[in-house]
Image (tube, grey):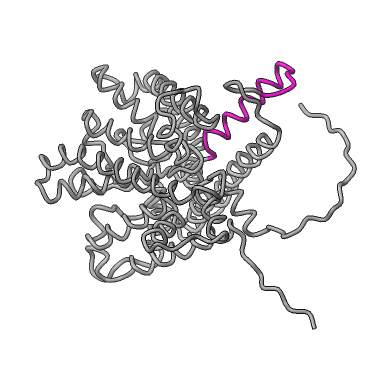
Amino acid sequence: MRRRTKAKLSSVQIIALGFFIMILTGTALLTLPWATRVPGGASWSDALFTATSASCVTGLVMQDTGTYWSTFGQMVILCLIQIGGLGFMTIATLFLLLLRRRMGLREREVMVSSVSYGQLGGLAPFVRRIFLGTLLAEGLGAALLSIRFVGDFGWGRGIYYGVWHAVSAFCNAGFDLMGGHSGEFSSFTAYAGDPLVSLTLCALILVGGAGFLVWDDLLRCGWRWRRYRLQTKVVLFVNFVLVVGGTVLFLLLERGNLGAGKPLSRQVLESIFDAVTPRTAGFNTTDTASLSAGSTLLTMILMVIGGGPGSTAGGVKVTTVAVLFVHTVAGIRREQSANAFGRSIGDGALKQATSVLFTNVSLALAGTIAISLIQSLPLTDILFETFSAIGTAGMSTGVTRSLLPLSQAVVIFLMYCGRVGSISFAVALLEKKALPPVTLPQEDLVIG
């Protein structure tokens, strides 16, 4: 008699399931009566939307975080943000290390998939560096933000706000508590001209969105550029281009709109923030709904790109865009290989990058069509919302609160796919244990 083999979940399926369980747990906690400031507690739909947005570090909200949720509710959201940002497997591995338990091969495989680490060995020191680096970045950010917030709100609330927003910024979550002081859904518009708050938030967003492997490389190699991995060089270079280029473009696009009549220093500061926050933090110091058409398009492009792989940021990742760009240039020049920083980038990376970009854009467009069928909203606003959800950016023109339950379900699905990874989500559902050993005949196809 043949023994029945037990079905074994793949690493990707475990990660997808873990996020799903975390979302359900967060939803249950947020529906408790003491999680809100209003009598009766939150509705199931509001709790599910908020738990998904926090777990997937997105930032889209149905209710203002600072005025609607109680301190308990805010702490639940913050825990979901921290776990979702670092990845629940990173947190689980850290607990195993604290309990002095050895990680098995299976746990190592899942951890490697969770943080995009390239090898099974050396995971324990790597996780420790992630944890210590997170504490250092969030602690320093909290201290800097508290300098301003303590003066504005007093010691207790000021420190609480400093810590809360440092975690939210580092995890690229985009949740804020400023609604009770600057008006609901106002984000950091009251601090648009404050360099300390704006630049601290920008620094946290960029550090969190760079990726754990980049941190590891910087710690290992210091300032010796030539010794960095190709991934580190690509992430740092593309981030620099996007921040500088985005700042210049926002400055030019908004000079006659939101920047009209403001000092140049204020315009530059706001433009820097506008260039950084779509990648994928969700804060804003200017009114997103009032951006010019060009700035709205630029914001959507930045939301699609996102941050670095294995980071707290979402999007298709800067490495995906870099691979597509390098291969496109090589194709135009009819070169035999696509090269960057003295290294060749193979066709395998091109296939993966193409799949990631196509799947993310397709999901966003499919979500746009679905919401358009469900309710009548301006097309630009729906596009902005769906690209924000799939990129886990959390920025909105204000239509989030107008979404009907079915439209909310579409956005929830996109946020989940955006965090788990659209390709990973497809693999989790469709993954086969073995491929048939058959290769179909090849035939050329005319392209372009």
- Report the residue at 36% width, 20% height from top: 251
Which residue is farthest bottom? 1
Instruction: Give the x, y percent position of residue 445.
Output: 84, 33
Q: Is residue 277 left or right of residue 163?
A: right
Q: What is the quadrant of residue 282 in the picture? A: top left
Q: 58 left or right of 72?
A: right
**Range drawn in magenta:** 316-338
The quadrant of the image that shows the C terminus is top right
Please tell me whether residue 237 is drawn above or below residue 58 in the rendered image.
above
Does the magenta segment cover residue 284?
no
Is residue 106 toward the left or the right of residue 33 in the image?
A: right
Residue 12 lies, in percent from the top left, at 58, 56
Task: Check the picture and name the quadrant holding the N terminus.
Answer: bottom right
Q: Residue 204: x percent and y percent?
A: 33, 37
Camera-nearest residue between 102 and 208: 102
> Of residues 8 and 255, which is closer to you in this image?
8
Q: Which residue corresponds to the image point at 57% horizontal and 29% vertical from the top-left?
A: 322
Depth check: give the residue in front, 230 or 363: 230
The image shows residue 28, relative to residue 377, as above or below, that is below
State whether the magenta stretch is mostly helix, strand or loop. Answer: helix
